[in-house]
Amino acid sequence: MPIVSTRRTTLAALSCLALAALSGSPAAAADLKTVVSGQLTVAYRTDDKPVSFIENGKPTGYIVEFAQAIGKELGKEVEFVSTNFESMVPAVKNEQYDTAAFGVLVTPEREAMVDFTTPVGYGEARLVSRKEAPIDKVQAAGGKTVAVTRGSALIPLLNKIAPDVTVREFPNVAASLNALLAGQVDGLFTGLATADRLVQQQAELMASQAVTSGIAAFPVAKTNPELLKALDDAIDKLMKDGTYTRLWTKWNPPSVEIPEDMYAEYPGMPHPEQK
Amino acid sequence: MREPHVPGVRFEAVDKFFGAHQVLHDITLDIPRGLTTCIIGPSGSGKSTLLRCTNLLERPQRGKIFVEGTEITAPSTDLDALRTRIGMVFQHFNLFSHLSVLDNVTLALRKVRRMKRPEAEALALEQLDAVGLKGFERRRPSALSGGQQQRVAIARALAMKPEVMLFDEATSALDPELVKGILGVMRDLAASGITMLVVTHEMRFAREVAGQVVFMDQGRIVEHGPPDRLFDAPESPRLTHFLDQVL
Amino acid sequence: MPIGLQRILDTFFDPQIMGQAFGTLIVTGLPNTLLLSILASLIGMVVGLFVATGLMAPRRLIRFPCRTYVDILRGLPHVLTIYLIGQGLPLAGLSIFGRDTYAYAALAIGLIEGAYMAEIFRAGLQSVERGQVEAARTLGMSGAKTFVYIVLPQGIRRVLPPLTGQFILVIKGTSLVFLLGLTTSQREIFSIAQDWAINSANLSPLTAAGILYLALTVPMTYAVNAWDRSMRAAPGSQR
């Protein structure tokens, strides 16, 4: 399958899924309680390409499209609402959104607030640095200043791997990248897909090995266990029928592979077709 | 020593325009040293403008002005130094509203004359006492009556020990019962022998105090001479008409 | 308790989370916020005064660039200006402050505030009556001395209330320093609160930060107002 899997094939696949959902519509899904009755209200981020971002005025990205597929499964229209990271989980808890289409890493603090579905990804990260001042391993970041997106769960991870590191938090990847290029920081620690994209775009940059950061899942209010159950079921189905694999291949460069843990979590999940 | 025949102020063929409008026409006049010269005339006659030319608050387009024999209209004139020699009192007092009475008087002494504060304050208190404002030095101008404010303004100007004093309708903004007090201060000052140039509507003051009276109308000097002659035997119909109206 | 109220309390006013957040907010955030506010205000006032006099200049050649400066910096979103200055300078190879985030941020916020303060100062300086200037000049004071001792103190006093409002905006505006990237110990009040909110998935740290901002701005407003009144009411005044 070519990397640029056309939108049409994806849409065709999704509409097939939708038809299947409609024909075999489970009665439970129809009266599933959601924030806005009859639809799934989902928070997303506009700035986290390729996971969850905005393009041509429309929310898109592989977790966004995955959430759309889940909506079809549940027989509900998906309404995306852009939000910022810090208010995302509290808003889900307060039943403003049903869930968040973003790789929300599961942490004990967050688990105290909301329930999480089964995994939709495993966070992986790389340390990006300038070739003229290379940091070839994440472990070598000690004593250096490294840019990380604020509030990211990557910060404790980096502190654990390289305890002497100075973490400098930036509001977004663009600002982190500028600081790296301008020599204001020595490295940039970010998710795998973003790191690979940066290295691809900027010839003067290089990336370290990938390290695993944690489980990403959809948050759901503790008051709505029925929705959690429905989401879990839908996720399980989409994992096994190849939808997740297709979306992953569509949105990630070939170098970024589905983590082995995902195959272990969902036995029977198909691998991407090899070229 | 000063040469006795040099006038305190001399105007030579002074023309002043505001835009295209000519407000002073060919003014030639001597202000005798040590005497008070009162300028009278209807409003808009150019008398205030002439006064303001004396310390170059307004700069004439043509003609020359001399103060104590020095041409001040020359381009090389140090304006700030010149102005320390010419005190001015305004119709609306123009006290520095953010400063106390004492600081109003001492500011220029300290910042221009470079006096130390105690020295400047001693001199200021002396001047305030002379205008009858002992004990008011800590107040703000806004806490004073108009008459008191004008006394401070006079003390402020006199503290610089000027050679010439200019009064621009100094009593016109005062309540009638306060006018007399200020005129009294000005009368005492005139008696001290300083050169004074006074624009005023107070005809009695002009008659009693002035050594010379100048009548202006429409930007020109119509008549000038001793007060008795101007008030008792005006030569021009315009002055006759003016005196009929104000007396 | 109604469920809605309970949710508000849980989300914004969780006493335990607020209590924990206050420690770091006061020890780390408050000094950083104050440092940046003071630096940015100082730069803003110097730039503001300078530009204000430029705005009043009789010569177009001076007036026009000052006008343009004010229009652009007041018109652009602050986020963009801070990026342009704080990241633009190092990207252009002009790392004048090395890696000192606060210096870049103070410069950027100061330049923005300078544009707002220029208009405030201009209004104040222009409100000083002509007679005040004439009185000073007739006493032999130079134009510069007249400006420093007469026009400036009177002009600034008249604009103290709007100037106070601008200082409050500076204090709150310092939170934008996060755009330029902060290490843990460099975080000011709002950054700490935001990080805390993300990690605790609760907005109470932001409420705690809000309380600190109020603790800074409300007393400042009252102090300036009291000062303002004491200067207007003359000592010994009966009028």
Image: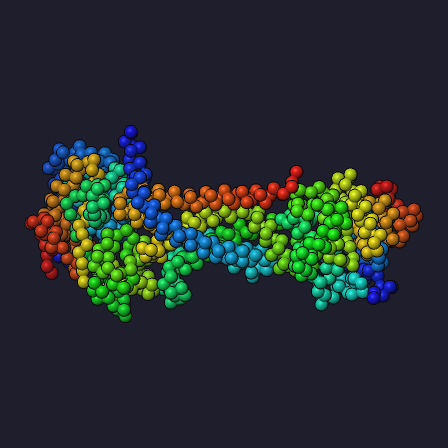
Residue B65: tell me if it is visible: yes
Q: Position of residue C148 (x, y in %)?
A: 60, 56
- Relative side of B139 to A107, left or right: right
Q: What residue sits 33% from the left and 65% below the top?
A: A183
Residue A208: tell me if it is visible: no
Q: What residue sits 41% from the left and 48% below the top?
A: C172
| Residue in the foreground of this view, choosing between C31 and C122 | C31
Kindly give the residue lying farthest to the bottom in the view shown: A132
- Relative side of B27 to C67, left or right: right
Q: Where is residue C206 in the image (x, y as percent from the top left)?
A: 34, 44
Quadrant in the picture for the N terminus of chain C = top left
Residue B56: quadrant of the picture: bottom right
Kindly give the residue lying farthest to the left in the view shown: A268
Q: Position of residue C218 (x, y in %)?
A: 45, 42
Q: What residue sits 41% from the left and 60% below the top?
A: C103
Vertically, is B54 above or below A83? below
Q: Position of residue C199 (x, y in %)?
A: 26, 47
Residue C14: quadrant of the picture: top left
Colour basis: rainbow
- Relative side of C135 to A74, left or right: right
| Residue in the foreground of this view, choosing between C109 and C103 | C103
Quadrant in the picture for the C terminus of chain C = top right
Q: What residue sits 27% from the left and 41% below the top?
A: A90
Vertically, is B70 above or below A102? below
